[in-house]
Image (tube, rainbow, N blue to C red):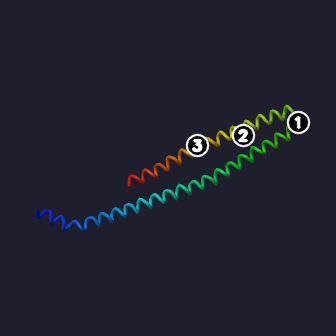
Amino acid sequence: MAELSERSASSPFQPAENAEAQAARLNQSALEFLLGAQKIMFEELVFLGDEMLERTRTEMHLFTEFVAKMAGAHSVKDVRTMCRECSQHQLDFIRRDYERLFKHGERMIATTSNLISNRSLN
């Protein structure tokens, strides 16, 4: 009985300390989550800018190649061959571009799931 009264005498201070520690831990977890989300958003903006620049550069290269081949074509057969080659180049570019975007999507899913799983563990 004496132990019970000693526990009740010391217990009013423990829940307050636990609550403060829990609040601090939750605040830290929320801060880490928000900073991680901000980092992901910034990386996405940088990626978008790089992708737009790369896409524009590649499209300009393909267009320049098309114009040069069109200027060099002197017959219908040459124009047909040029169209076939340029179409193949365009399809190869689109395939590489989408492969790169799918790989980026996989990395983003992994990064987001890591961010969420780290938050739930804390």
Residue 108 at x, y percent in the picture: 53, 48
Give the structural element (helix, strand or loop) at label 3: helix
Distance between the Cα atoms at labels 1 and 3? 41 Å
Q: Look at 84% across and 35% down and name the residue there.
A: 79
Q: Which residue is mark 1?
A: 74
Residue 82 at x, y percent in the picture: 80, 36
Give the structural element (helix, strand or loop) at label 2: helix
Q: Look at 77% across and 34% down and name the residue there.
A: 84
Q: Considering only vertical position in the picture, is 103 above or below 118? A: above
Question: Does residue 114 appear left or right of residue 21 in this picture?
Answer: right
Q: Which residue is mark 3?
A: 102
Q: Mark 1 or mark 2, which has the lower sequence index?
A: 1
Question: Does residue 33 appear left or right of residue 9 in this picture?
Answer: right
Decide: marks 2, 3 in contact (CB < 8 A)?
Answer: no
Distance between the Cα atoms at labels 1 and 2? 22 Å
Type of residue at label 3?
A: Phe
**Residue projecting furthest to the right:** 74
Distance between the Cα atoms at labels 2 and 3? 18 Å
Q: Mark 1 or mark 3, which has the lower sequence index?
A: 1
Q: Look at 75% across and 43% down and name the residue there.
A: 62
Q: Nearer the viewer, mark 1 or mark 3?
A: 3
Residue 8 at x, y percent in the picture: 19, 65
Q: Mark 2 or mark 3, which has the lower sequence index?
A: 2
Query: Mark on residue 90?
Result: 2
Type of residue at label 2?
A: Gln
